[in-house]
């Protein structure tokens, strides 16, 4: 498959560097994305919108041959981007993989309350993040993460996702790689009708697989993450 890798907040294509070898070894062609405004800390993020980030994923899909089998992989808030892209191009997407993430519903934003004057949303101090999210991030990994972190365009944090194809996108086969929150907890939330997983609950073909670690498995367990994504993309019985 052609695998489009979409990073979450504060990261660009380099976040996937250690994840891609197992995917390449499995025969896939990888396309790690650097989204608008995320190339470096010097980028101008004042005019970058959530729609720009979704468009960047859609443009990568459109740049591939029409007969290419395309998979989308989104980490964290990148999950909302790949879901919106699958909504825009449902006939082109063979599978979506969410890495410690999930689909965002129409109208859902990461943080609608982020002040309108925030242009550069910086990586928070470690003390301001949930301890579970930091599992596996050694002092050295934290140093490397902060060194490579790029401010997130504020508009992409507070603007809501907009979806249109309420039928086709729910048919796209879906895998959730559960890291920070175990699969049994996610399934429990789904049984309760929790809004965090409401959109995933609507899907017709999904699976949840566990990869226990914190919120950034591309740093803490990169080879295992690559293997998990490759397994999600492997043909199912009766397929091709």
Image (tube, rainbow, N blue to C red):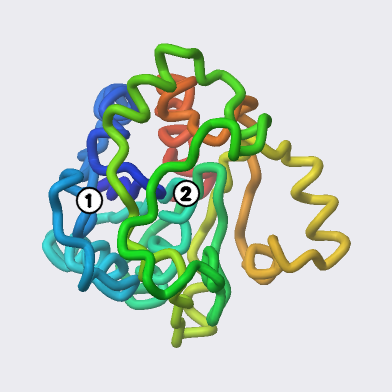
Left or right, 62 with reference to 205 = left
**Residue 33: x, y in percent?**
23, 49
Which residue is drawn at the image coordinates 40% and 48% (left, top)?
Answer: 8
Whether residue 122 is situated above or below residue 47 in the rendered picture: above
Looking at the image, is mark 1 or mark 2 nearer the viewer? 1
**In the image as oriented, which residue stretches furthest toward the bottom?**
164
Name the foreground residue: 203 vs 140: 140
Mark 2 secondary-structure assignment? strand
Label 2 sits on residue:
97
Residue underneath mark 1: 38
Pinpoint residue 185: horizontal percent, then vertical percent: 80, 44
Residue 17, above or below 187:
above
Residue 196 sits above or below residue 167 on the image = above
Residue beneath the point at 44% across and 82% down: 162
Quarter of the image for residue 116 reads bottom left
Residue at 32% x, 42% y: name it.
11
Count the numbered circles shown: 2
Residue 240 in sight from this viewpoint: no
Query: Which quarter of the rendered picture does the N terminus lie within?
Result: top left
Q: Residues within 10 Å of mark 2 (few under 14, many from 20)?
A: many
- Up-down: is 58 above or below 38? below
Q: First in sequence: mark 1 or mark 2? A: 1
Q: Nearer the viewer, residue 18 or 159?
A: 159
In x, y percent, where is residue 55?
Answer: 24, 71
Q: CA distance from mark 1 to mark 2?
A: 22 Å
Q: Report helix, strand or loop for mark 1.
A: loop
Residue 111, given in percent of the width and then of the height, sits at: 54, 66
Is 133 placed left or right of 217 in the picture? right
Q: Nearer the viewer, residue 22 or 185?
A: 185
């Amino acid at each position: 498959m052609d695998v489009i890798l979409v990073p979450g907040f504060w990261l660009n294509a380099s976040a996937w560097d250690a994840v891609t070898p197992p995917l390449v070894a499995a025969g896939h062609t990888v396309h790690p994305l650097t989204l608008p405004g995320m190339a470096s800390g010097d980028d101008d993020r004042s005019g970058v919108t959530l729609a720009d980030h979704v468009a960047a994923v859609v443009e990568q899909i459109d740049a591939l041959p029409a007969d290419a089998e395309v998979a989308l992989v989104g980490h964290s808030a990148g999950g909302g981007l790949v879901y919106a892209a699958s909504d825009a191009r449902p006939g082109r997407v063979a599978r979506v993989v969410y890495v410690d993430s999930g689909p965002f519903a129409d109208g859902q934003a990461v943080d609608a309350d982020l002040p309108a004057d925030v242009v550069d949303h910086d990586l928070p101090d470690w003390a301001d993040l949930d301890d579970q999210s930091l599992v596996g991030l050694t002092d050295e990994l934290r140093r490397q993460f902060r060194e490579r972190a790029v401010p997130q365009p504020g508009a992409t944090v507070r603007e809501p996702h907009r979806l249109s194809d309420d039928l086709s996108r729910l048919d796209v086969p879906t895998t959730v790689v559960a890291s920070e929150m175990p699969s049994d907890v996610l399934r429990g939330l789904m049984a309760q009708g929790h809004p965090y997983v409401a959109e995933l609950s609507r899907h017709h073909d999904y699976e949840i697989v566990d990869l226990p670690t914190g919120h950034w498995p591309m740093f803490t367990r990169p080879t295992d993450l690559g293997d998990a994504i490759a397994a999600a993309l492997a043909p199912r019985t009766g397929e091709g």
